[in-house]
Amino acid sequence: MVIAIDGPAGAGKSTVARTLAQQLGFTYLDSGAMYRCVALISRARPEVAAAELAKAARIELGGGTDAPATRPGPGSVVMLDGRDVTEAIRTPDISQAASQVAADPGVRTAIVARQRELIARGDWVVEGRDIGTVVAPHADLKIFLTADPQERARRRAAELGVDPGSVLEDMERRDERDAAREHSPMVAAQDALLIDTTGLEVQDVIGRIAQLARRLRADLGDAPAS
Ligand code: C5P
């Protein structure tokens, strides 16, 4: 079973997706971490086309593809070509660079192929921008999380330990680029459930999605609706 969680930065995707995966016993996939990895290598090797780097990169997420990520914080362990880049991919600079390389169709083709291969078997909660529309259009459950920009900036700032004013502009620039790009723009799938998380407790959002997932699983006959 695949649950797709899309939406802009700071809408609560990571917390919701990771906790949901833990609660349901699914594997969590942070698709944005892959674009961040490509941005990081691209910085180090600007002479090579980003799509080539994306094809060749060895990206390992969450210490393996079977175990749900358990590490707290903005991301689980990310290894790139054998190096721990967990912290290095989370800088504001790499956030912008990731959104730039993510607009490259060659990069997307390489990364989407890997993501599809990963989620072909087993139960997954996948977070990103194009999961419900491109990576897993047949996902069993699609959620699009939003929140007003001020609140999203506050959440991002709390994650990064900085002032909300300093992240708002960067965040809006990145969201505009992600939503306006020609290939796989950030957009809610037609059959996605839209949840505006402004003013909502994250636990309530998780509870609501978990309930939907359990009901679906029971309907599919996979497991009891516990
Ligand atoms: O989710 P996160 O902020 O880590 O993603 C970093 C960037 O990667 C996004 O701003 C977006 O440009 C890109 N991305 C994407 N498609 C995804 C996930 C992330 O284009 N499925």
Image (spheres, grey):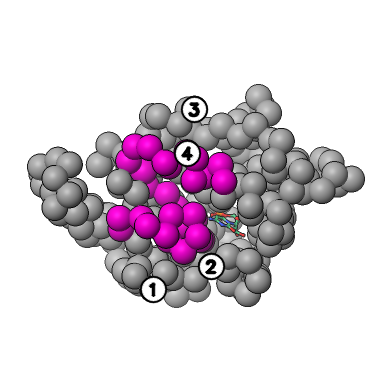
Q: Which residue is mark 3?
A: 63
Query: Mark 2 vs ligand 1: CB under 8 Å?
Result: yes
Which sits earlier in the primary sequence, circle 2 or circle 3?
3
Q: In the visual, does 8 lie left or right of 198?
A: right
Q: Which residue is mark 4?
A: 118
For the residues bearing labels 1 and 2, Cβ distance under 8 angstroms: no
Q: Residue furthest right?
A: 47
Which sits earlier in the primary sequence, circle 3 or circle 4?
3
Which sits earlier in the primary sequence, circle 3 or circle 1?
3
Q: Is residue 16 above or below residue 118?
A: below
Q: Residue furthest top?
A: 82
Amino acid type assigned to the residue bearing label 3 in the image: Gly
Task: Identify the residue at horizontal 38%, vertical 73% (top origin).
Answer: 190
Q: Position of residue 226 (x, y in %)?
A: 10, 44
Q: Which residue is mark 2?
A: 186
Alpha carbons under labels 1 and 2: distance apart: 12 Å
Alpha carbons under labels 2 and 3: distance apart: 27 Å
Query: Mark 3 vs ligand 1: CB under 8 Å?
Result: no
Which residues fall within the magenta stretch? 113-141
Alpha carbons under labels 1 and 4: distance apart: 24 Å
Name the one closer to the observer, 19 or 202: 19
Amino acid type assigned to the residue bearing label 1 in the image: Gln
Q: Position of residue 219 (x, y in %)?
A: 13, 52
Name the one closer to the observer, 68 or 49: 49
Q: Which residue is mark 1?
A: 190
Q: Quadrant of residue 169?
A: bottom right
Choose mark 2 or mark 3, whichever is in front: 2
Query: Mark 1 vs ligand 1: CB under 8 Å?
Result: no
For the residues bearing labels 2 and 3, Cβ distance under 8 angstroms: no
Task: Identify the residue at horizontal 65%, vertical 31% (top origin).
Answer: 58
The quarter of the rendering in which ligand 1 is drawn is bottom right
Queried whether the magenta region covers residue 162, the answer comes back as no
